Image (cartoon, rainbow, N blue to C red):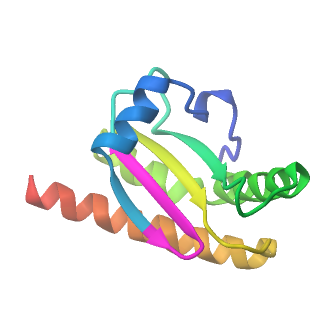
Amino acid sequence: MNERLGKSYKLKSKKIIESVFNDGETVKQFPFLVKFCNQELPSNQAFQIVFSVSKRRFKKAPDRNRIKRLMREVVRKNKHSLEAQLQQNNQQLALFLIYTNTEIMSYEEMNRKIVLLFERLIAQLISNETKA
């Protein structure tokens, strides 16, 4: 199993990010909010993702960087369930993951919450498919 989360998973296209915010859907699992959109991506990965932490809530850059580092690590460890679902349905997804808490969470708690978030996201994708 490949647990890498390399450059090809990084969402950089301003057009795609803009479309995620304009046309995308939202799934919440406190303290995370993920905006997502079915999109044709420039890479061959199942999804590309952006990690975001509010400058208003965390004034110090080291705090924001620590949270983003933890988020990246948790996503790297738990991406397989989401990737499997997307590959099964031959979809690509653009994700924008936002941290909304006012305190830095522990790795274990963040791991639990992101697993729940991915489960909700997969459920949302499945329900969208049944509607279409």
Of 115 and 95, the residue lying toward us:
95
Q: Is residue 121 magenta?
A: no
Picture coordinates of residue 110, whole percent (x, y): 70, 72
Give the residue drawn at x 76%, y 77%.
Answer: 108
Give above or below for 1 relative to 90.
below
Q: Is residue 29 magenta?
A: yes
Quarter holding residue 8 = top right
Picture coordinates of residue 7, whole percent (x, y): 67, 28
Range of magenta residues: 28-37
Quarter holding residue 17 = top left
Q: Is residue 76 left or right of residue 93?
A: right
Q: Is residue 110 left or right of residue 84?
A: right
Give the residue drawn at x 29%, y 58%.
Answer: 125
Picture coordinates of residue 35, whole percent (x, y): 43, 53
Dominant secondary structure, magenta: strand
**Residue projecting furthest to the top:** 42
Q: Is residue 15 left or right of residue 124?
A: right
Give above or below for 13 relative to 24.
above
Picture coordinates of residue 79, whole percent (x, y): 57, 54
